[in-house]
Image (cartoon, grey):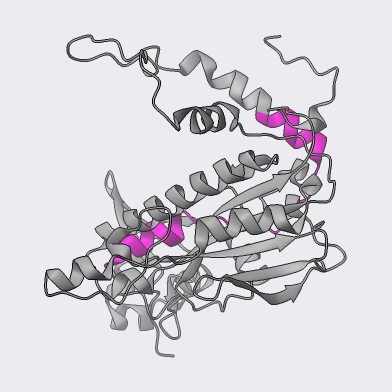
Amino acid sequence: MSLCLSSNVFFVPLGDSLVAWDFVRHKQFLLSIKGVRAIVDPEFRTANPEIVCELTNTEILVKSPTDICPRWEWDVLSKIFHFGTSRGKPDDFVPDAGRQAREYVEYCDSIMKHMPLDSFTTARGMYRSLIPTVDFPGLEPLRTLLEQRRSNRTFSGEELSFSQLSVIIDETFRYRKHDQEAYRRMGMSTPTVRRSSPSGGALQSCEAYLVGRKVSGMDPGIYHFRSHERSLGLVAPLSKDFSFGLLCGGQMFADDLSAAIVITCRFEKLMWKYKHSHSYRVALFDAGHLSQTALLLATAVGMRTWVTAAFFDDEVRRELRIPSMSTECPLLIIGLGTGPFNPFDAHLGAGYVGKNG
């Protein structure tokens, strides 16, 4: 049987040993000297079938190379980072809202004693106060929004109006024209467009999907925002057992969201122009800029908001009907809903008191 090394594995020295790290399945294997030799020496494999069996069972050696994303044009380091930091749903995952809420708070309590004391009060250079002494025209509404924007983790699940969501999505994600005259004066042209938030190379690598569960005038479903047309296209209806909480990595308080915006990135829109994987950072910047714009707009129209990157990547891609081999990947989910402000998970219960409380 002809075998080859899996393309989803890289190797890391650990003392006198070698670790085979499967960055797709998030598994690590400590290799023996014989195991290393079996990987690089076909003749040794023929004489040692028991070692080959171990290497095939762990999928370090495979019958044919696997490629999880054939259009990935950046270097292998960015590929390892992207898929190595993606989060899959464990086979034994069983949601328990109350237990998970308590465990998270207790974990936060447990690490407080290890917090570096000087990490949150950085002071360098000469001192000069920046407390504003002058009010500028038009600043106060923005200042109010910045003060009111907070992350909420308790929602009431009431219906949102379509007009509210329209303002948020349209103002954040629609395409706007460049100043073409400025380009003409320089003897240049640009095929790209802009949004209200900055984007690396004005390439607008991010896409927006509305997951509407309780929105007036809309059937529950997943909709893609067509930025060039300023319209929504139905991707798929929501299933009866759809759960925001399960989608968001088991953060079950999210089940009371009324809607969410999923921001994805089409990496190929960056890859064709910026060949170095340093531009992977640009994708993250783009998503961050867009999310802050959307959060401020949502605050302005009276919604409660929450944003997370803690979700099951494959589950999100499946819900959005993104092909498994596509270079379009989810980066952020913005939760939208109603209810009183509460920064804590409602499943903690009104009478919950932490260990340090």
Is-magenta flag for residue 96?
yes
Lateral position of residue 258 relative to residue 165, left or right: right
Q: Quadrant of the N terminus?
A: bottom left
In this orientation, which residue lies closer to the viewer: 155 or 190? 190
The region drawn magenta spans 75-104
Q: Quadrant of the C terminus?
A: top right
Relative to 70, residue 107 above or below: above
- Residue 37 screen position, x and y as percent: 29, 69
Is-magenta flag for residue 17?
no
In this orientation, which residue lies closer to the viewer: 317 or 59? 317
Question: Going by the picture, which residue comes out furthest to the front?
Answer: 137
Lateral position of residue 254 relative to residue 75, left or right: right
Counting labels gives 0
Locate residue 19: give its quadrant: bottom left
Relative to 209, residue 144 above or below: above
In this orientation, which residue lies closer to the viewer: 114 or 294? 294
In this orientation, which residue lies closer to the viewer: 96 or 184? 184
Locate residue 187: give its quadrant: bottom left
Relative to 107, residue 72 above or below: below
Residue 154 visible in the snapshot: yes
Residue 93 visible in the snapshot: no
- Residue 53 screen position, x and y as percent: 50, 74
Q: Residue at x 80, y 35 (%)?
A: 339
- Residue 132 screen position, x and y as percent: 37, 16
Q: Residue at x 74, y 49 (%)?
A: 245
Question: Going by the picture, which residue comes out furthest to the left?
Answer: 186
Lateral position of residue 187 relative to residue 355, left or right: left
- Residue 229 screen position, x and y as percent: 54, 76
